[in-house]
Amino acid sequence: MTSGSGIQIPSRLPLLLTHEGVLLPGSTVRFSVDSPRNMHLVSHRLLKGTSLKSTIIGVIPNTRDPEHDTDDLPSLHKIGTAGIAVQVVGSNWPKPHYTLLITGLCRFSVTSLLKERPFVLAEVEQLDKLEQYTSPAGEGVTAEDGELGELSQKFHQAAIQLLGMLDMSVPVVAKLRRLLDSLPRETLPDVVASMIRTSNKEKLQVLDAVSLEERFKKALPMLTRQIEGLKLLQKTRKISPDTEKRVLSVRKGRVFPVQQLNLDDEDEDDDGDDTTALERKVRGANMTEAALKVCLKELRRLKKMPQSMPEYALTRNYLDLMVELPWNKSTKDCLDIRAARTLLDNDHYAMDKLKRRVLEYLAVRQLKTSLKGPILCFVGPPGVGKTSVGRSIARTLGREFHRIALGGVCDQSDIRGHRRTYVGSMPGRIINGLKTVGVNNPVFLLDEVDKLGKSLQGDPAAALLEVLDPEQNHSFTDHYLNVAFDLSQVLFIATANATATIPPALLDRMEVLQVPGYTQEEKVEIAHRHLIPNQLEQHGLTPQQLQIPQNTTTDIIGRYTREAGVRSLERKIGAICRAVAVKVAEGHRVPRSDASTPESPAKQDKAAPPEMPIVIDHTALKDILGPPVFEMEVSERLTLPGVALGLAWTPLGGEIMFVEASRMEGEGQLTLTGQLGDVMKESAHLAISWLRANAKVYKLTNIVGGPDPLEGTDIHLHFPAGAVTKDGPSAGVTIVTCLASLFSGRLVRSDVAMTGEITLRGLVLPVGGIKDKVLAAHRAGVKRIILPKRNEKDLEEIPANVRADLDFVTTKNLDEVLNAAFDGGFTHPQLTSKL
Ligand code: ADP
């Protein structure tokens, strides 16, 4: 930087609001940020900008209590410090956040706010001259006489006196000495206040002192207090170089231009007690013998270590964790099967099979406490209540509940922790979870085991296996802890969307319980029994204020959501509650009455409580949720030959799937588009071959009426809707029907959907996921479903009311499929009419 009269910070600064300490000009402080606004500031501004200017931001202390922090902007502290972000580090653990290293430049005051989102941007006025910090000592000193001169003289002397009491061989002390010599005196209050031990409140006072005189006056007592403290200490204890190192401790890594040090007399005072207290805690933590041995060894090392060593903090953190772990703390199981049944029934509608199996599992556990049975794994689409059943299990047992999300975990140290040798090492999620719940027998829900990844950092599934294996998990060794911890009391439950991607070795340990999607009627019941009451309560509303009638719920389910579970339904109900909560909170405006009623305008405009209850009808629904997202599109789409409706299964539940075909002049080529897997392509070729072989029987023709449908014709098959890769052979019958329609020019019935695998000889083979597929077809308003004959047994699982709405046609071969898919059958249909 150059010296001169006009170094200016930009007049518009993005503002970082922080609870963490106060940045003073000339010091460098590390801030960890995770609020949405600050995160946006980092990602939109710091990480995008390329100029030096774009790294300058304003740091404003957020004086609002973090506990009560809300989304709206707090009233801003009037003065802040502009600083350069010298380092940005991002991390996703334990939650997304950035760590910024910021060097303070100068004070500013906020003149006006320009915008609040996505981050705060303000017009600012620079309050300090920047040259103060950049010009060498001697220059730029403004007033050496008068009161200010005297003050600055006093301050400088005090600082020198403090230095005199410390050992110059300690690098931090030497640094302070250098700074005292080289920096202009008016910068000293800021620099020294950030280096000595001061509270944030005191630092805030220094920040607020815009006039230099006041700043000296505020900082001087802090400096003197530090000296007095040190004197007292010297009186009571002879300072050895070793303790002195501890008196002065480098707090965090610092860069330019100042090292922040902590002349920490209080810590020194209780340092001895501190380790004794820690030792007491270690001995009282009831840990295993091996763990105690390791801890005592670490404790001995800690006592010998100067606090300034980075390892000190590491060891200390380790010991703190060891003390906190629930080595021998557990909750008492209180299982009463009858009560458990009531509780499960009260919490969850339907899902009878699952509830029955869960009760059996719990009953066996009760009889045989050291159960080494399989791990229960709930498999089903999102939002069908897998997590929520897990939570209920914990409640029935009277145990703590903790959810461990495994989606995307691809590093085994996520499960097993990092070795302590490397910086930033920490325990894995299992140990962390135990620390959080504070007991050693919680219910751990391993969420999304099917989304575990794999990478160079080792296979997390293998680590998880060790956790789940009852033969091994009584001595699970986290790399960070490096001593065994007994996990055998933990009750593990897993959830997944599909079993196909669960690592086989893991799957082998688990008992899979399918949780299929819900029917429309079940959803209505769930909404009225659980979701609506819950959402009302969460939004502080009562049924006397808001009512959602059954047909509105049906409307939400049919026209605003398309899902197997009830998660979006719950969200939509939440949206309605929010909208109504606003109405209730602000009160209805009394509608302007007719001009004939002579009321004063003031009276008319008065807010009155809204009419209770607010009933959500179709119009209100449209106002709140907007126009319907889904329309019944089935019948519309089937108005051209060459379209058929298939049923697909995805990990998110069943789905309806349109298959479209068109033909044009060409050389018999087949084009396939849509997200397809290999099996699907094979099915398409099979279908074409079968239709060509049977073209005569069904009177199928090519584009100009020739007997071979492919002659001089190109065919294009498309599988629209959804970016989901549709693999699986179950689309075979749909492709055949779609092409048969194309080659014959006849329309497929608009209310029929189908599923089934085909063979070259025209047989129809059974497929999986029937329940989910049927439910999806029912949701979409389909009336007839064509299935393979051998899937007939699966129809038993389908709720009676859904079965009653649908006409099931079970088929053994493609001939039967085609006859069921076209009005009046497919084989020789013209014959009858011509006769
Ligand atoms: P998942 O873990 O399967 O994705 P959740 O357990 O998070 O789903 O369920 C989403 C929401 O739906 C929760 O609020 C849950 O209480 C509710 N829910 C799901 N199924 C039922 C049910 N059968 N009865 C009552 N509430 C349910």
Image: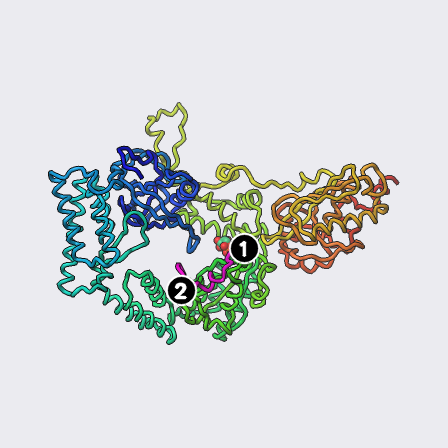
Q: Is residue 419 magenta?
A: yes
Is the residue marked 1 within 8 Å of ligand 1, measured from its CB? yes
Please indicate, yes or no, whether residue 515 appears anywhere in the rendered image: yes
Badge 1 element: loop
Q: Which residue is mark 2?
A: 420
Amino acid type of the residue that numbered disc 1 sits on in the rendered structure: Val
Range covered by the magenta-colored residues: 407-427
**Location of residue 263 by image quarter:** bottom left
Category of crowding for the residue at label 1, using alpha-carbon neighbours closer than 10 angstroms: few (below 14), some (14–19), many (at least 20): many
Q: Residue 207's mark?
A: none
Alpha carbon distance from label 1 to label 2: 40 Å
Q: How many marks?
A: 2
**Could you tell which of marks 1 and 2 lies nearer the N-terminus?**
1
Q: Which residue is mark 1?
A: 384
**Relative horizontal placement of residue 658, taking residue 291 as reference (left or right):** right
Badge 2 element: loop
